[in-house]
Image: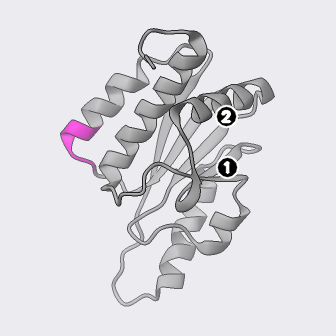
Amino acid sequence: MKLVIVAVGQRVPDWAQTAWDDYAKRFPPELKVELKTVKTEPRSSKTLETLLAAERERIEAAIPKGARVVALDERGTQLTTLALASKLKGWQLESDDVALIIGGPDGLEPAFRQAAHERIRLSDLTLPHAMVRVLLIEQLYRAWSVNAGHPYHRE
């Protein structure tokens, strides 16, 4: 199974890339994690609908065929670490790839967000996109460690 994180926006600070790389290498071979970045649509004089539609096309092109789509959304389901671990276990049992989608500065196109298989929320706080990438991969690693009985997670 593969976890594919599709993130709108290509540039992140060095600290965020370093943290991402550190967590990505911790995952076991049977649970691969991949980051696919898609270009943010230039704002210029375009409408919000046009911007989001262009980003949606790029996002959809980056999602593996047949993958379960999980949109990160401020209105999504709030999960505890243990609930995320349970979801991860379920995804692994289904053996499908899972694409977790991080929208751009304007979020995700509403129809795309609604069409996702699931919508989850990482925090009630507004977070910078670089932080979301790091927080997401850390929580996915923590969820895996819970399921594996690894001492990384202690209650």
Across and down, in percent, residue 45 comes to 37, 90
If the image is split into quadrants, where does the C terminus sit? top left
Between marks 2 and 1 in the image, the one whose residue lies nearer the viewer: 2
Q: With respect to residue 70, does 146 lie above or below?
A: above
- Whether residue 13 appears in magenta in the rendering, the answer is yes
- Residue under the point 58% across and 58% down: 76
| Quadrant hosting residue 152 | top left
- Residue under the point 20% across and 39% down: 14
**Helix, strand or loop at mark 1:** strand
| Residue range (magenta) | 12-16
Nearest the eye: 124 or 67: 124
- Residue under the point 46% across and 88% down: 47
- Residue under the point 67% across and 72% down: 111
Separation of disc 2 and disc 1 at Cα?
13 Å
Q: With respect to residue 115, does 14 lie above or below?
A: above
Of the two numbered discs 2 and 1 on the same chain, state the one appearing first in sequence. Answer: 1
Q: With respect to residue 99, does 33 lie above or below?
A: above
Label 1 sits on residue = 69
Disc 2: CA contacts within 10 A as few (<14), some (14-19) or many (>=20): some
**Helix, strand or loop at mark 2:** helix
- Whether residue 15 appears in magenta in the rendering, the answer is yes
Nearest the eye: 27 or 63: 27
Across and down, in percent, residue 81 comes to 52, 33
Across and down, in percent, residue 110 comes to 61, 73
If the image is split into quadrants, where does the N terminus sit? top right
Q: Is residue 18 left or right of residue 136?
A: left
Label 2 sits on residue = 87
Nearest the eye: 92 or 76: 76
Say if mark 2 contacts mark 1, CB within 8 Å. Answer: no
